[in-house]
Image: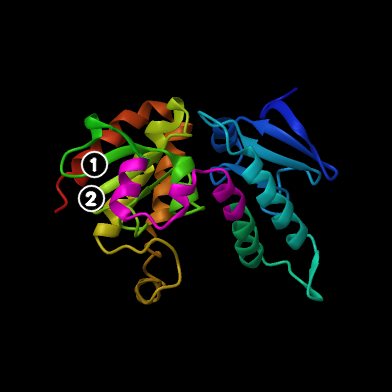
Amino acid sequence: MKKPYLKKYGSILGFTVWIVDGNYIRNHINLEFNNFGQHHRFRFIPKKEFWIDKGHRGGEEKYYITHMLIEQKMMSGGKNNGKVLENYGRALKKADLAEKRERLKSIPHNLRKNLPKKEIIKLVHKNLLKEYSNDLKVWVVDGNLVRTLLNLNFTQGGNDKYYSFIPKNEVWIDDQIIPAERKFVILHELHERNLMCQGWQYYPGSEFDKKHNSKNKLPRYAHSSAIMIEKLCRKNPHLLDKKLREVVAKSNKIP
């Protein structure tokens, strides 16, 4: 068995489910691969395979399989109410709903109710990474609970400038991220947040983007810039600690 395959998880409806080395994939194939994927989302995945990142703790495989079955069907020309749905955005919405239902079945009844946000924050906070924290706090969080109670699409990490549910002046790192990758994700999130504090937009499509996307200026997208610096350091690991010190120093100077 060659990388990135680690072990066969099982088979379902003609698809082989593999546990794969997400770190290897992000380093050598595609940085955007997150917790799971299927062929119509990531073309490097064979058509009859579902891939799930081994993660640090596991335990969410059945949710991802539910999600991928719906996503794959819709994106491969499956019909719904007589219309062929090939758009990833629409497939994602329907798959998210199915995954959400499955997640809610597995948690205690008291957590299914609308808990106050402060209580949810207490539940998901695991440990503060003091070496990266000052006025800005960098937390390792329970990624499973975040996806179940707050946002299904939270993966690897996030910051308060992008996710409205993250408290002010906080960056969250998914506890599913293996220790070998944690620094790359912290670098990505802090760099991205620093740029958004300067007025950069996360993604294309805003009025800000249109004003700055001229012949003489490159689009100023914080996420794209964060991907670039993360890629640089994954290819050149000796640069990681230096770049991380720089973004930590900048983040602690931002009001």
Q: Which mark is residue 120?
A: none
Would residue 104 be counted in the magenta stretch?
yes
Amino acid type assigned to the residue bearing label 1 in the image: Lys
Write down the residue under mark 2: 169
Write down the residue under mark 1: 137
Q: Which residues are magenta?
A: 100-123
Residue in view at x 68 percent, y 39 percent: 51
The quarter of the picture where the C terminus appears is bottom left
Instruction: Find residue 142 and report its image quarter.
Output: top left
Residue 39: % across, % down? 73, 49
Q: Using the image as rendered, state which of residue 67 and residue 210 is in the foreground.
A: 67
**Magenta stretch: dominant secondary structure:** helix
Callout 2: helix, strand or loop? loop
Amino acid type assigned to the residue bearing label 2 in the image: Asn
The quarter of the picture where the N terminus appears is top right
Residue in view at x 36 percent, y 64 percent: 201
Number of labels in the image equals 2
- Locate residue 117 relative to residue 210 in the image: left or right: left
- Locate residue 208 relative to residue 143 in the image: left or right: left
Instruction: Give the mark nearer the N terminus: 2 vs 1.
Output: 1
